[in-house]
Image (tube, helix red, strand yellow):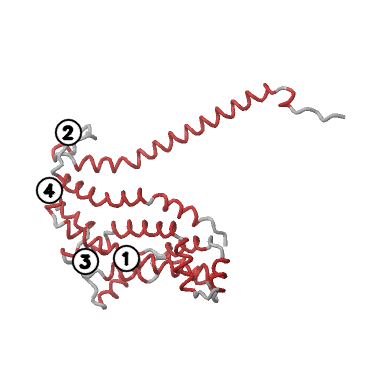
Amino acid sequence: MTAPASIEQVSPSLTKPRQGSQLMRSVVTSLLWHLLLSAFGIVLIAPLVWLISTSLKEPSAIFMLPPRWIPNPIRWQNYPEALAAQPFLRFFLNTLNITFFATLGTVLTASMAAFGFARLRFPLRSFWFGVVISTLMLPSIVTLIPTFILFRWLRWIDTFYPLIVPYWFGGGAFFIFLLRQFFLTVPLELDEAARIDGASNYRIYWQIILPLAKPALATVIIFSIINHWNEFVLPLIYLHSSSKWTMAIGLQGFSDLYSTQWHWLMAASTVMVAPLILLFFSAQRYYLEGIHMSGIAGR
């Protein structure tokens, strides 16, 4: 007996409407998702567009109704005037100094701690990792007064040390967790082969794990730079001299009790935000890869 023919063999024309309806449904679904994401993207980018637009307006045109998104005329001199109104170069160098050294400490110490939790075997490893992760539930405002008293006792008030030194002691629980998850995706056979060749843990960490963890390290670098670049509360608490202010504090110089120079404030804010935007788009591939790979490990 011969096997019964399939529906496609008996009547291929019957499957065409079904395939056509599935294709149409897929196209409509994709189109709806793209429209939804486009609308969401417009909502997110609108404040940035308004920031740049306001930075190029005359003071009298900022609060016009209906608002003008395209300045007319374009006032480019807002930028040099804003940068000259405050010692913005000094603020920029202070922010760059704090961001560089704090990020360097975060990357080095967080990766070392993550290497220990991911690649080494020691008693109560899971327990201590849980203790580290539990610190994420502790609000930073709770430890603000004790840390201020400690830094005052060390005579670090009005210096950059409170904004740099703490990040050389682990870098933060979130970054340790992120790097640990990525390190778990690296095969342990690489460590075992290196130890057979006489490599120490430090050499394995420096020459094997870190070169393979570039996407995760790029993610940590981006997050850390954004955090320190935009930090306002801690510099406001610890930095009292205006010569040590960061850009986030310097922006407050355009406001007082009676008026705000909005065109200068927006121009200075644009200058402050521009490096972060360039950093994100230049390292976007590593950032997305690091986030993706850090969530794969199941051990």
Mark 4, Cα crowd under 10 Å, few <14 / some 14-19 / many 20+, is: some
Q: Nearer the viewer, mark 3 or mark 4?
A: 4
Gap between marks 1 and 2 measured at Cα: 42 Å
Mark 1 or 2 closer to N-term? 2
Mark 3, Cα crowd under 10 Å, few <14 / some 14-19 / many 20+, is: many
Image quadrant assignment for residue 250 = bottom left
SS for dot 1: helix
Which residue is label 4 attached to?
81
Residue 92: x %, y % from top left: 21, 58
Image quadrant assignment for residue 9 = top right
Vertical order, 254 against 95 (above or below): above
Residue 239 image label: 3
Amino acid residing under circle 1: Ala
SS for dot 2: loop
Residue 102 image label: 1
Q: Nearer the viewer, mark 3 or mark 2?
A: 2
Using the image as rendered, state which of residue 143 and residue 106 is in the foreground: 106
Please tell me which residue is depicted at 20% across the width and 50% down the height of the picture. Answer: 268
Mark 4 or 2 closer to N-term? 2
Which residue is label 2 attached to?
72
Residue 43: x %, y % from top left: 35, 39
Amino acid residing under circle 4: Glu
